[in-house]
Image: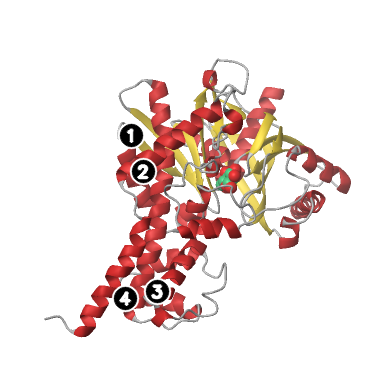
């Protein structure tokens, strides 16, 4: 006969597992997500349906088969997450005629008032950071070509011209949406007047990541980010890119798949926690797919799950600390710490005590399960997106099997202890006809922007 205590624990665990089971998606359900993403991708590419598609499939004007590149010094800017980075990239040729790249860079915080202020404030701040960087390297007198990694949805007219469609990831700066981002940067540099720059290219971080990995592996035709936000780009046949004239060759398309679900395609899978996170965000109703996966949201999703368990008297004796009740207090990096636990529960205990609770062993176990549920769902749902892209490319190629490399970056992918493995396994299960290599990029955003600028300079010369 199990003791009373054990019976209570078993009953409690069963209730917990039932609540968490909502996060588990069957393979059939993931295939459904994949097919729906593919439908939206198709809609995004077609002129007739582009407007109503939730996956925008934005042409980047980064084409296949670049004919060589310039060598020399380039400046790269990277804006898109919690930091802003300025980078000096030296591109030269190696003995085999390939690229050789050396970089030095500097990170700058983005103050909250700049993130939510005016366009002028944001771009003046960026120009100020560049000025500071050039001072450090005594390069103020040089007019360098500049590549700008701007990790938001941009409708390009050319590689160096594009308007911001909408902010994501908590940015709210006024006066940028609907405007030419490169123009705003050029104006700010002019306003300062203490240095000059030749802005030659603006790219999304997924595109920069793909290009920087292509430099190592020429099969790299997909770029992906799983960080604060989540997105992917890939090489599409020009004949399918209806928003740009011309049928020949291929062009990189920025899917902006973070917006998937914004026209209702994910309703069947979204849970109460997803709705709360969305409603409390600065862009309710938008980026619903990203809000399931991105590091900006996963911690908060977990906190809401934990509060639900507390409210059902299944955790912390039915009482949450003040901190646990505070929005944003459970950061995504804590999921990584908790899931790194090696079995002794020390990490979990430490994290929870800093959040003001004194957990029992069973509490630690339950919190671990909750984290695992949220992050596994993220990895699997994200895998459905990538399988959607890869299976589409495979169909385009009409081959029996396809070998492909995916260049990938982002804090969730890099630092979560199990995301990678769960994600890779599920992508391979959902795209069985493809031989997929995942290549983690190093400083891809900056290096990629510089390489694209090097190619753009060559084309213009
Ligand atoms: C943006 C994308 C970006 C992704 C990853 C999303 O919020 O819309 O443009 O690639 O985050 O940084």
- Earlier-in-chain disc, 1 versus 2: 2
- At a point 61% along the width and 23% down the height, the residue shown is 243
Tell me residue 242's x, y (percent): 58, 21
Q: Secondary structure at mark 4?
A: loop
How far apart are labels 4 and 3 at the CA level? Answer: 26 Å
- At a point 82% along the width and 44% down the height, the residue shown is 189
Does the beta carbon at disc 4 come under 8 Å from ligand 1?
Answer: no
Q: Does the image show residue 276? A: yes
- At a point 42% along the width and 80% down the height, the residue shown is 318
Q: Secondary structure at mark 3?
A: loop
Determine which residue is flagged by label 3. Answer: 312
- Can you tell which of label 3 and label 2 is closer to the viewer? 3
How far apart are labels 3 and 2 at the CA level? Answer: 29 Å
Determine which residue is flagged by label 4. Answer: 344
Determine which residue is flagged by label 2. Answer: 30
- Earlier-in-chain disc, 3 versus 1: 3
Determine which residue is flagged by label 1. Answer: 435
| Image quadrant containing the N terminus | bottom left
- Earlier-in-chain disc, 2 versus 4: 2
| Image-based side of 429 in relation to 124, left or right | left
How far apart are labels 1 and 2 at the CA level? Answer: 20 Å
- Earlier-in-chain disc, 4 versus 3: 3
């Amino acid at each position: 006969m199990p003791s009373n205590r054990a019976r209570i624990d078993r009953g409690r665990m069963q209730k917990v597992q039932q609540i968490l089971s909502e996060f588990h998606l069957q393979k059939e359900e993931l295939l459904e997500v994949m097919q729906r993403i593919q439908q939206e991708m198709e809609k995004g590419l077609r002129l007739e349906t582009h407007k109503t598609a939730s996956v925008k499939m934005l042409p980047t004007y980064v084409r296949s088969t670049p004919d060589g590149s310039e060598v020399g010094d380039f400046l790269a800017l990277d804006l898109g997450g919690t930091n802003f980075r300025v980078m000096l990239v030296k591109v030269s040729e190696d003995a085999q005629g390939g690229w050789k790249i050396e970089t030095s860079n500097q990170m700058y915080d983005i103050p909250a008032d700049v993130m939510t202020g005016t366009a002028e404030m944001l771009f003046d701040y960026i120009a100020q950071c560049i000025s500071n960087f050039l001072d450090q390297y005594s390069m103020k007198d040089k007019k360098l070509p500049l590549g700008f990694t701007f990790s938001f949805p941009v409708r390009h007219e050319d590689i160096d011209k594009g308007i911001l469609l909408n902010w994501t990831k908590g940015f709210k700066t006024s006066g940028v949406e609907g405007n030419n981002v490169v123009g705003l940067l050029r104006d700010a540099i002019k306003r300062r007047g203490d240095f000059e720059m030749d802005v030659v290219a603006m790219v999304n971080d997924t595109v920069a990541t793909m290009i920087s990995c292509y430099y190592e592996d020429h099969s790299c035709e997909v770029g992906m980010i799983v960080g604060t936000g989540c997105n992917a780009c890939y090489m599409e046949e020009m004949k399918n890119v209806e928003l740009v004239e011309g049928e020949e060759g291929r062009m990189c398309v920025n899917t902006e798949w973070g917006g998937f679900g914004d026209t209702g395609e994910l309703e069947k899978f979204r849970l109460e926690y997803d709705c709360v996170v969305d409603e409390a965000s600065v862009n309710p109703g938008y980026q619903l797919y990203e809000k399931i996966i991105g590091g900006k949201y996963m911690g908060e999703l977990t906190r809401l799950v934990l509060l639900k368990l507390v409210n059902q008297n299944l955790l912390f004796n039915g009482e949450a600390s003040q901190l646990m009740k505070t929005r944003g207090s459970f950061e995504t990096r804590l999921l990584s710490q908790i899931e790194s636990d090696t079995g002794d529960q020390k990490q979990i205990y430490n994290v929870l005590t800093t959040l003001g609770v004194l957990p029992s062993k069973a509490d630690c176990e339950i919190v671990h399960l909750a984290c695992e549920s949220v992050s596994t769902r993220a990895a699997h749902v994200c895998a459905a997106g990538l399988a959607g892209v890869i299976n589409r490319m495979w169909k385009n190629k009409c081959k029996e099997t396809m070998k492909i490399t995916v260049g990938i970056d982002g804090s969730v992918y890099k630092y979560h202890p199990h995301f990678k493995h769960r994600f890779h396994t599920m992508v391979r299960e959902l795209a069985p006809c493809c031989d997929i290599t995942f290549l983690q990029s190093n400083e891809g955003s900056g290096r990629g922007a510089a390489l694209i600028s090097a190619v753009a300079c060559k084309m213009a010369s």
